[in-house]
Image: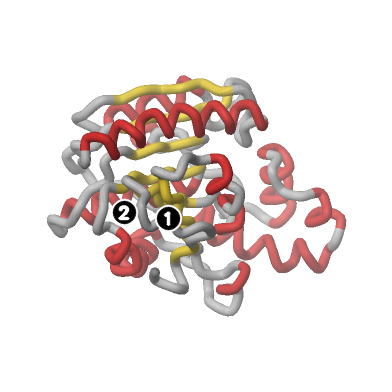
Amino acid sequence: MSGRWLRNHAPRADASVRLLCFPYAGGNAAMFREWPALLPDEVEPIAVQLPGRDDRYDEPPHTDMAALVAELLPAVLPVLDRPFACYGFSMGARVALELAHALRARDLPLPARLFVASSAAPSLRLPVRGWSEPDEGLIAYLRDLGGTPAAVFDHPELLELFLPLVRADLAVVGRHEPPPRAPLDVPIRAFAGAADTGASPDRMEPWRAETSAAFDLTVVPGAHFFTDDGLRQVLRTAVEDLLAVGAAGQ
């Protein structure tokens, strides 16, 4: 396991498929800490830990997608020795997509499935809020999204530490212009919160253009951050897909 980049909270040597999990802007690998208890033994979740947070707080966060993926790619190679899929939430969806393209460009193993959640389709080229705004604008955006603990907003010292990190993460997506390229030959399933406005079901449906294989859109309860029932539905649906991957040995 590549120590800086990957966190395996519950190693499963006999799992038939691995699930690489990519967090949202400002998020960290801990958001997937409970997933081993929610997934069957056949699925081994492995969380990606980006620089600038938790035990990597002393490393500068990336602000450029190409540089991030260039460092991430060699770190994930050791865990691609069995069938795998990628799950990306919000910013993480875009990172997972770019990683898949980087793997294809180098003729390396591709994910058997790509799961993208709460992320408007790249082809829409929508502006990303927050990263280029003053702190007040970024804070307002974070409040609109939800998901940030109230304690962060209530304590200036926490906010001072958090804002540069989330601004850098948002810049990764906000500055990125995907080049013209052929779609991936990887099935994609998109998950959209029914009440999400920024990544509404209508804005997630065009993820269809990113694949020449199957595409499915699943709408779940919640907004940008799903309700508990919504997350359970996400995991149930993803597990059905992942067990099919494991059974096929893809």
Q: Is residue 58 above or below residue 123?
A: below
The residue lying at 58 percent from left, 21 percent from top is 194
| Mark 1 in CB contact with mark 2 (< 8 angstroms) | no
Spatial distance from mark 1 to mark 2, Cα to Cα?
A: 24 Å
Would you name the residue on which mark 2 appears?
99
Quadrant for the N terminus, please.
bottom left
Furthest-left residue in this view: 107
Does label 1 or label 2 sit earlier along the sequence? 1
Residue situated in front as seen by the camera: 160 or 222: 222
Query: Within the image, what quadrant is residue 239 found in?
Result: top left
Task: Classify residue 216 as left or right of residue 199.
Answer: left
Would you name the residue on which mark 1 appears?
12
The residue lying at 41 percent from left, 22 percent from top is 217
Furthest-front residue in this view: 14
- Residue 14 in the image, given as x and y percentages of width and height: 36, 52
- Residue 108 in the image, given as x and y percentages of width and height: 17, 56
Q: Which amino acid lies under the numbered mark 2 shown in the image of this protein?
A: Leu
Task: Classify residue 13 as left or right of residue 120.
Answer: left
Q: Which amino acid lies under the numbered mark 1 shown in the image of this protein?
A: Arg
Query: Within the image, what quadrant is residue 189 found in?
Result: top left
The residue lying at 39 percent from left, 32 percent from top is 124
Furthest-bottom residue in this view: 58
The 10 Å Cα crowd at callout 2, few under 14, some 14 to 19, many 20 or more, is many
Quadrant for the C terminus, please.
top left
**Tag 1 secondary structure:** loop
- Can residue 10 be seen at all in this image of the molecule? yes
